[in-house]
Structure formats: structure tokens, C-alpha cells
Image (cartoon, rainbow, N blue to C red):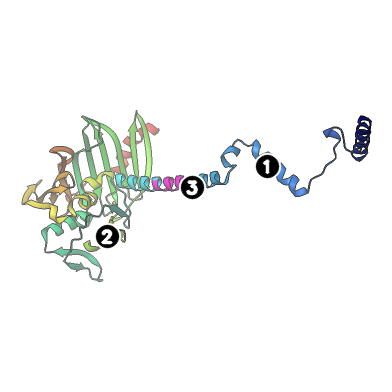
Amino acid sequence: MNTRFDNFRSILRECFSVEYSEVPTDEESIKYSFSKRFTKRTEKLIKRQINFYWCIINRFWKKVLIFVLLLVLLFSVVLYFGIGYDTYMQDSGHLSSNHNYNQENTDIEPVFESDLILDDDGNIIGEIFGDKKASIFNSMLNSFYYFNEAYLRFELSLPYAAYGHITEIECSVDLKNAVSEEKVFENGELVSFSYSDGKSLTVRSIDYNEFNKDTYPVFSKENEKYVILSERMYTDGYGDIKFVYKNNVANCPSAKYSLIPQELAFKYLRNFKNREIYDSNMVVFGRHCVGIRGKESDEDFLFIVDSATGILLNYEIAENGIVTEYMNVKECKIDEGVAIFIEENLEEYIEEDK
């Protein structure tokens, strides 16, 4: 029995040996080949795996996530620089005439009834209002139409100013020739100055005894067309109130605090219900003025406005009874002639460049 089994095993072993005699005994002697497509894809895969970012993109859902994150980042950058530019332009007082400024919708849509003032060619150059509040509001939004020359010296304190810092600003403007000069003092020391020669506005700041220089375009009063009050603010399709600003034709960065106070007017005076004229017969610097006070959100405000021009001569903003911001004019001359000696001042200002 065993002999038969052994014979069977011997025969079976011999059959297998003959059948697989051509099979290589080691891997190196095995002959194989792949298609060109398979080889090409494999090589690409190997190259990708070598890259450091392979673990981030080796799955479809990871690619989708990265794409979404890039879109969010791109949107954030665009939004940031857009807001940053608008903020800079507002701080410098250079606002485009067709600039729209979003504000939270407060459901305030006052009706401005007025009689239009036309020139000989039929162009609108002003409005006459029966409502005193509307008249003052409009004057502050269009102050530069009502004067040509001005000199102001005023004290300014802003919420973000360092404690104890007192800012004093002197500015002289000639709107007809687009010429201006401005000096900014901090605690009695000159920290910046600007001047316009009618062609460009130069702003120079002093930082640790170093002078930085920036140049901006000059805006002309003659190029600013009058926009009726009813078109200076409106509600868009999203329910947001938008404002239309005029350019800073005073060509002074500080103009928005006094000479062209349209930003303050839009923010605090657009709601006629929350403010009152507490004194309509004030006299400041020999000029007839109007006193306005009211409340906007959590802030109480008080304005003293020149009736003839809409120039702001004094304002205070307070929160919980504490004054957080104020501007007080110390000296004022309107259409009394101004002396702007830019050429002489230039030699003094840029002496450090020689």
C-alpha cells in the first residue's frame, strides 16, 4: 500500500516539475511588462507622493475643502482692502462724490420739501427749505458752496487719541484757487503739515524727526455739481441707508471736522426726530450760529453751526455723560481774506531734504 502511494507521489512530483519547469525561481528573473498608460500614471503618482503637500490633496474631499478655504480667504482680502481704502479716504477727508456709505437701516426716510435755486443756464445751484432743521442739515452737507476763503484754528480730541494729548490744527483754504495749508500740533509740537498748490496736495508727517511725504489729487470747487438733498441719502434694495458724499474741495485732511462736516451731519443729524435746535440766535466770532443737540444710539451730541455757511464751529460727543470726542474752534475768519505763503513755507518745510 505504501509502495503504491510513494509511486503516486513520485509521479505527481515529476508532473509538477515538468509543468512548472519554466517558472523562474527568483523575482529578478521574472519577465513582465505594463502598458504605456499604466506606466505613465504610476510615474505621476510617484512624483506627487514625493511633494510635501501630497498628504493635503490625496483625497477628493480634501481638495474641495482647500478650494472653499481659498475662496473665503480671497473674499476676506478683497473685503478688508475695500473697507481699508474707504476708511483711509474718510480719515484723510478725500471722499469721492459718488461714494456710498452703508449705515444700519433705522427706517428714517425724511421728506425734504424745497424750492430749487437755478442759475442762468437752468442748473441747480441750491435749495430753499421751509424746515429749519432741513436747511441746517443741507448747509452742513454743502458748506463749501457758501464760502471761498477761510482760516480756522481749532482744538480737536478724538476717542482714539492718547490720554492727555491735545491736538490743535490751523488751516487756511482758498477754494477758488484750490490752494490750502494745514498744520497739526500735538501738545504744542508740530507733527504734520499739508499744502496744496492747486495741482497736488502734499501731506508730510514728522515721525521721530523723520519726514514722511505723501501726495494726493486736488479737488476743485468748480467741478462739484450740486446734488439736491433728497438724493444725498436713500435706502437700497437691502434696506441699508446709503449716503452720497462730496469731494473734499478744501484740500485739507481735517476739513471733515469743521469746514466740510458732511460725515458728522450724516451720522448725527439725519434723524430729525432725535434732535432739536435749542438756540437759533447764537453769536460766535461775530457770526450768527445755531445750536443743535440730540441723541444718536447711545451718544449725546451738541453742535454749533454757522448759519450762513454750514461750517461747524463746535461739537461734543458724549456717552453716559462723559465727553468722548470734541472740537472747539479758537479762531475763525471766513471770507475775510487768507494769506497762504506756500512758496515760503516750502523752504521751511523741506529744509531737511537739502
Q: Judge by depth and name the residue closer to the eye, 179 or 118.
A: 118
Query: Label 3: how many residues lie within 10 Å, few (<14), some (14-19) or many (20+)?
Result: few
301 shown above or below 351? below
Q: Is residue 33 left or right of residue 140?
A: right
Residue located beneath label 2 in the image = 235
- Quadrant of the rendering where the C terminus is positioned: top left
Numbered circle sitting on residue 71:
none
| Residue furthest out toward the front | 1
On the image, the x and y values in percent for residue 289 come to 10, 51
The residue segment tinted magenta is 71-79
Q: Secondary structure at mark 2?
A: strand
Q: Judge by depth and name the residue closer to the eye, 141 or 230.
A: 230
On the image, the x and y values in percent for residue 218 come to 34, 51
Q: Judge by depth and name the residue closer to the eye, 219 or 24.
A: 24
- In the rendered structure, which amino acid carries the disc numbered 3? Val
Most common secondary structure along the magenta stretch:
helix
Q: Is residue 129 left or right of residue 20?
A: left
Residue located beneath label 3 in the image = 68
Q: Secondary structure at mark 1?
A: helix
- In the rendered structure, which amino acid carries the disc numbered 2? Thr
| Residue furthest out toward the top | 208
Q: Secondary structure at mark 3?
A: helix
- Nearest-to-viewer mark from 2 and 3: 3
On the image, the x and y values in percent for residue 227 come to 26, 62
Q: CA distance from mark 1 to mark 2?
A: 57 Å
- Specify which label sits upstream in the sequence, 3 or 1: 1
How many numbered dots are placed on residues in this image? 3
Q: CA distance from mark 3 to mark 1?
A: 25 Å
Numbered circle sitting on residue 45:
1
Identified at 32% across, 58% down, the residue is: 98
